[in-house]
Image (cartoon, rainbow, N blue to C red):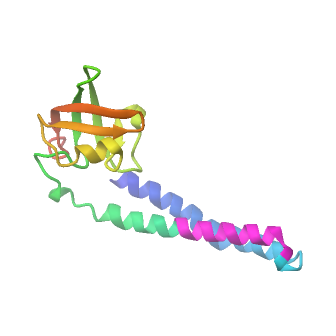
Amino acid sequence: MEDIKKKLKAELDKLEYELHHDLPKAIQHAREFGDLSENAEYKAAKEKQSMVQARISLLQQRMMEVESIDVSKIPTDKIAYGSTVVLFDLDKEEKVTYELVTSEESDPDKGKISTVSPIGQALMGKEEGDEVKVRTPTGWRNFEISRLTTIHEKG
């Protein structure tokens, strides 16, 4: 959880610096070109400023969400954040292992999928033995949950 907070904070700090240091300089420089109604540099700098402000708001909201995750309230017997699940793909007849993480930690190539991804959402709240049908970008997939290890069992 601390890694996520550090990652969010680093991006937030970078954007805050850009908003309060770099962009005011760019806007001031663009103003020197004169007529603001015809000034493409000014419009671009103001647009960038709006985008940076919006991203900062989003990151601040995400920081609050991450800080409010209470690990003690995560179920001990159902799939939730931090769970590692072994799924049996009923169509391909092969096993696949996923760890459910936040969107910031997501790395599908390493088996880390977000709790808000199609598979992640379908798995949330399920138990060992449940069958899950998931609509993915590549079509429907059918899984049986073979094994569940919750965040509490990982120590």
* Of the pair 19 and 115, the residue shown nearer to us: 115
The image quadrant of residue 18 is bottom right
* Of the pair 89 and 128, the residue shown nearer to us: 89
| Image spot of residue 14 (x, y percent) | 58, 61
Residue at the outermost top position:
93
For residue 67, above or below residue 150:
below
Residue found 46% across the figure and 54% down from its top: 7
Residue found 84% across the figure and 72% down from its top: 39
- Image quadrant containing the C terminus: top left
The image quadrant of residue 44 is bottom right
Residue found 29% across the figure and 39% down from its top: 134
For residue 45, above or below residue 139:
below
Quick check: is 44 in the magenta stretch?
yes
Label total for image? 0
Residue found 65% across the figure and 70% down from its top: 49
Provide the major secondary structure of the magenta segment: helix
* Of the pair 124 and 57, the residue shown nearer to us: 124
Image position of 37 (left or right of 77)? right
| Image spot of residue 135 (x, y percent) | 33, 40
For residue 143, above or below residue 74:
above
Find the magenta span and give its range: 38-55
| Image spot of residue 2 (x, y percent) | 35, 54
Image position of 77 (left or right of 97)? left
Image position of 134 (left or right of 3)? left
Quick check: is 6 in the magenta stretch?
no
